[in-house]
Image (cartoon, rainbow, N blue to C red):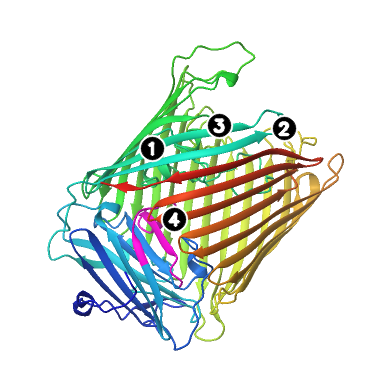
Amino acid sequence: MDGQMTEQSWLQADIATDFFMVLPMDTSKAKVKTEVRMAYDDQFIYILAICFHQPAQSFMVESLKRDFVFGKNDNFIFFMDPFDDLTNGYSFGANAAGAQWDGTMYEGGKVDLSWDNKWESVVKNYHDRWIFEARIPFKSIRYKQGITKWGINFSRLDIQKAEKSSWTPIPRQFPTASLAYTGSLNWDQAPPVSKSNLSFIPYFLGGVSKNYEAQTKPDVKKQIGLDAKIAVSSSMNLDITVNPDFSQVEVDRQVTNLDRFELFFPERRQFFLENGDHFSNFGYTNIRPFFSRRIGLNVPINAGVRLSGKLNKDWRLGFMNMQTGKVSKDALPAQNFTVLALQRRLFARSNLGIMAINKESLNYEHPDTTKTIYNKFNRTFGWEYNLASKSNAWTGKAFMLKTFSPGNPTASWAHAANLQYASRKWTVSGQYEFVGKNFNAEVGYVPRKDYWKTTASITRLFFPKKGPVVSHGFKLSSFYIFNSKWQQTDNETFLAYTMSYRNQTSFTTWVATDFVELLQGFDPTNSGKDTLARGTRHGWRAFGTEFISKPQSRFTYGFSTRYGGYFANGTRLNITTDLGYRFQPYVNIALSSSYNLIDLPAPWNRTQFWLIGPRVDITFTNTLFFTTFFQYNEQLKNMNLNTRFQWRYKPASDLFIVYTDNYYTVPFSIRNRALVLKFTYWLNL
């Protein structure tokens, strides 16, 4: 791996070139030239991409950080469908400075960048081009044994030219990751199958923490654990974890919470990520029967196993079993979590799936009434159908779920369906949802119950033939929520108009009307003040803007505004900003902020919240990283500092040093502090 095309294999390899422009318009060939070559041996897939540009043109990147933001980096990325099912696959690539990008692909065109595996790459820059060269072990991916055709596509982004292109033509309304539009990677013989594909990933951890709020003594932590990956077949993987630790996982980004319902934060723990879509994407965003962050929430995970992958081209299987320990102070028993997901491909790109989830409290006796009482068991069963037409123009989903708990109450159903049509000019969609009053998915994420919801949306884009604007158009959407007696409780109608420019800046302005009937008491500031009464009705109008600057500049910025009515005939002003500056390719500085000013009658009166989050990413090399992330949350009266040093001394093997600090702001006092050193090693057998 040297970023030079000197080997005889590259000189003799077939060339994929003559890319098509995707953005700003998909009606011509690409202006920037890209050439791709591929090869393989009995252990690796090799790829080399030559990304040409104007002589002496400088590249644009944020930093050497892994899994960079796609739209802010000159990059080359390719997408593989090794099952030839137009649905699942892998993505690999790099930016022009050599930072790696990798992820698993699901739902025909989405990429989960949380996945991380063992592969090598190098980027070398020349005066008129940059070259990306990589080798990917067959052991690092899953693929269908015996087939000699994979789906593949290559994507190139040149920020200076404001051009995104791909090897195969893709309509501009779809991402270049769309597996429906891949070309073919034809093998002269079936890819080799490794005789042994077993990986051990032990870790060693030492750390110290202190809870100043509880005034406890410093807690010294010494811990070891193990993850293992066993390839049951070339397309099926068994993951095992014993005494896992996730201390190196980056902290969640805090948000100002003015919502009446629980907020969602994504899963970041590595064990749950590979093929995680097969479990987590069942249902809708706010009707998830399975949410992995319910497992190990403030309790230790003793061990877990997960079997996931493709049984064949048409069948996909996921099975997970996790065992957590008990927490005596909360009278929380040891619990076992079992999840089964099975999916059958139908037609060109659609599928039908079923899911079963069981949460069991082990050796559990109800404590006295001063302690929380947990269910002996909680179970969820359901099916869903995912529609995806061959051209991806029509997509949709329908599902039905039922939960079971001791007593088995009625109204424990949830079901929903949606359908969307997308063309270059028009996007039209409709959706309905129902969640019963007693629907209780304890291992899921369902923040609201006992409602019917209908949603409709239409978008229309216009494309000027010349001028600085590449597209402009409107989006009109509306939803209504009803209770089980079909009495309206919520409504929002939203109209937005967006201008997208050839230099990749965009500006949106919008207006909206809202109506809410409170189903329970609610503090509109979420700050511990008085509550509005249940059954009270509130309506208002609001308007706002959103702007994103061009990514070509080293200084980038964006903002959004919202002003209008609020609960109790009040008003709310919200301003958010995102600022960034890069000393490429080594330093990326970002500052995000959110300001809310809420004006209400007594007893709330005038309330304001600041949420400020500066962040500094220093990438000394593409294997040595330092990140500092600070958050000040005025609503929670909380300050948080998280710093992480990572040295990737070998592919997928790391040394982490993590320091966290947490404070109350009023009165200013320290809450807790921790320092952790963690060493992981990836061993392939």
- Which label sits on residue 213? 2
- Which label sits on residue 226? 1
Find disc 3 in the rendering and name its residue: 298
Between disc 3 and disc 1, whose residue precedes? 1
Tell me if label 1 and label 2 are in contact, CB under 8 Å: no
The amino acid marked with disc number 3 is Asn
**Relative side of 673 to 430, left or right:** right
- Quadrant housing residue 558: bottom right
Nearest-to-viewer mark from 2 and 4: 4
How far separated are the C-alphas under marks 4 and 3?
A: 29 Å
> Can residue 629 be spotted in the picture?
yes
Q: Callout 4: helix, strand or loop?
A: strand
- Quadrant housing residue 650: bottom left
The amino acid marked with disc number 1 is Leu
Q: Is residue 678 above or below residue 157?
A: above
Quadrant of the frame with the N terminus: bottom left
How far separated are the C-alphas under marks 3 and 1?
A: 20 Å
Q: Residue 433's x, y, as percent?
A: 49, 42
Tell me if label 3 and label 2 are in contact, CB under 8 Å: no
Q: Callout 3: helix, strand or loop?
A: loop
Residue at image position (28%, 43%) is 237
